[in-house]
Amino acid sequence: MARKIRGFERVLGGRDLFAVAYGAIGSSMYFALGILVAAALGLTPVVLLVTGVLFLLVALSYAEGATALPETGGAETLTRRAFSDVVGFVTGWALFLDFLIVIALAALFTPHYLGVALDAPSLRDAPWDVVVAAFTIAVIAIVRLVRHTRVFAGLLAVAGLDLLVQGMLVLLGFAALFSGDVLLRGLSLAPGQHWGDVVFAIPLGMLAYTGLETVVNYAQEVERPETDIPRGMLSGIVLVVVLTVTIAAIGVSAFPAGDSGRSVLAEDWLEAPLAGIVDALDGELPGIVVDALDVLVGLSGVLILVGAAATAMSGCARLAHSMAEHGMLPRELGRLERRSLVSSEAIIVIALAAIAIVVATGATGDDTAFLASVYSFGVLLAFTLAQLAVIRLRRTEPDLPRPFRAGPDVRIAGTAVPLPALVGIPLTAVAFGLSLATHPAARYAGPLWLALGLAVYLATRWWNDRGVLERVGPPAELPHGARLRRVLVPLKLGAIGEEMVATAIALAKEQRATVEAITVVRVPREFALEGPLPADVAQRVEAGLEEARLLGDDNDVEVRTDVVRARSIGHAIVDEAQRRRVDLIVLGSGPRWRRQSRFFSPTVDHVLRNAPCEVLVVAFPEGIAEE
């Protein structure tokens, strides 16, 4: 089968995946710390430690799933395989929103760190922060549309710079700001603070560890998924958890809750909390050192946030690809392309949606806590379902190769079940319940988003003539199993045309599909498209169509025939494929074109570049069928 592009290639090593993991997950401390301190105050390090351990438990299940099924899609792939397409869609749709929120938050906080680095306070105020954030997302999208670049070496450099900056901040913070007494006093409730605030903070704590889905969506591009995925992902997560908890302890030491029950870190430095910790060093260290740290933290924040937005956009596009391949989203969002690799339509939709979130957030008073609440809804739902999927696959597919197992295992009803998932499922489920109970944004916006998604799912299944509960395989699996519904074959005269029809009918017979046989008559521009065909042309066209119908009758295959007049045969084939919603186009390629540098004829080349579905090219050897 001739593919339009090479598709995803296994080019990522362990270091590349570590850079993606650290950049995607580690970036969240740049925007989550202030949001979390506003709710948890002095208990922030404890909340981050608890959620960090929970995050690590979930990551073990993700590592098992990603090594067993090294494909794009992440939790959507796991839940679809373990349960059904509907459950997979619910998981993927919830994560789709989370990706958009991560892109929006990373972009919204970028101008605040840029303003610190450049000593430009205007960048931290409305409307310029929203303008810069929207511009950042647009630039990332344009770069992704223009060319698919391998940015992992750059991500590794950014991760190294960020580790250096974080290490310096931790050492200087411990030496000048850390106070065990202040930290211990923070473990009790501050004036005006209630345990309900701490409960409210627990789901928000998941915001500090974003990026897990981004990492596993690259599983199909990892050279050695059986070793590189667990090693690169888990090492990055452990490092991020340690740094996040440590920096949070320094932050609450430097900015303890006052008599008002509020922290300056969550008030004045909400959008740039790490820059706030550097500001607290003013007076403790020489001014030149503090100024240098401002620049370093600001630039590091900009780089890692932009990198996080870019990888989240790529991860989101890969998720859209997986969902579209399985009939959950419009087919256009799953198309692979030479220039951008993933679908350009998906990139545009993601960028526009993220910009809309940025603008709406700015218009409503920069309420980033609302976004954090909605994020907790999606991520906790996906985490719970993904862990359930790992356990179910252990039972339903015990022979599935699992290079990494989320052990230790315990035996339940004869099935070896991973203990981390058994512990993690009730914890993430409880946190999900807390999110619904304490966060109005999660309680209302989350279900509304799912309702919108189900409408999209139903419309997509209806448009593609698929059942709501039907399991739909990716186009790459078309020759294996009942995947085809409609096959388009453009008829042509001679041996090549006969073989094309025979191939299309053979595939349709195997998979009980319908054949759409069309004859495209190219009409020169000096003649009108409509009107009767010359008698000899009409006779030959009808003879070809009748032969296709008879061959279909002989093989019990329904063959629908039609005549299409067009200026360009290639454009007409693509248009008819879209209009008839076909799953496969069968084309023939004569040997005379392969004696030339272009290999395929202009018609075949145009269809390969623009077809909305899979294309099967029957290439005939020299001397068998000459055009």
Image: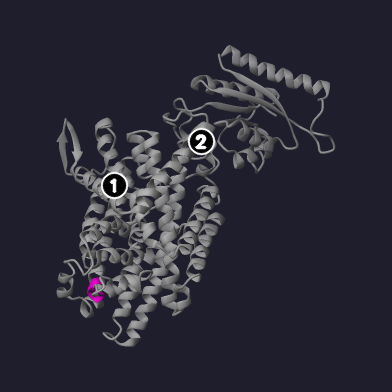
Q: What residue type is labelled 2?
A: Ala
* Quarter of the rendering occupied by the C terminus: top right
Quickly name the residue at label 1.
63
485, above or below 157, in the image: above
Look at the image and say whether residue 281 sits in the magenta stretch.
Answer: no
Residue 257: quadrant of the picture: bottom left
In magenta, the rendered stretch is: 252-256
Position of 405 with respect to 513 (left or right) is left
Residue 191: quadrant of the picture: bottom left
Position of 243 with respect to 322 (left or right) is left
Of 105 and 576, nearer the camera is 105
Q: Which of marks 2 and 1 is in front?
A: 2
Return the x and y of residue 571 as percentages of the image width and height: 68, 38
What is the image's colouring?
Answer: one colour
Return the x and y of residue 254 as percentages of the image width and height: 25, 76
Circle 2 crowding by C-alpha within 10 Å: few under 14, some 14–19, many from 20: some
Look at the image and say whether residue 255 sits in the magenta stretch.
Answer: yes
Position of 162 with respect to 136 (left or right) is left
Return the x and y of residue 568 as percentages of the image width and height: 73, 37
Quickly name the residue at label 2.
459
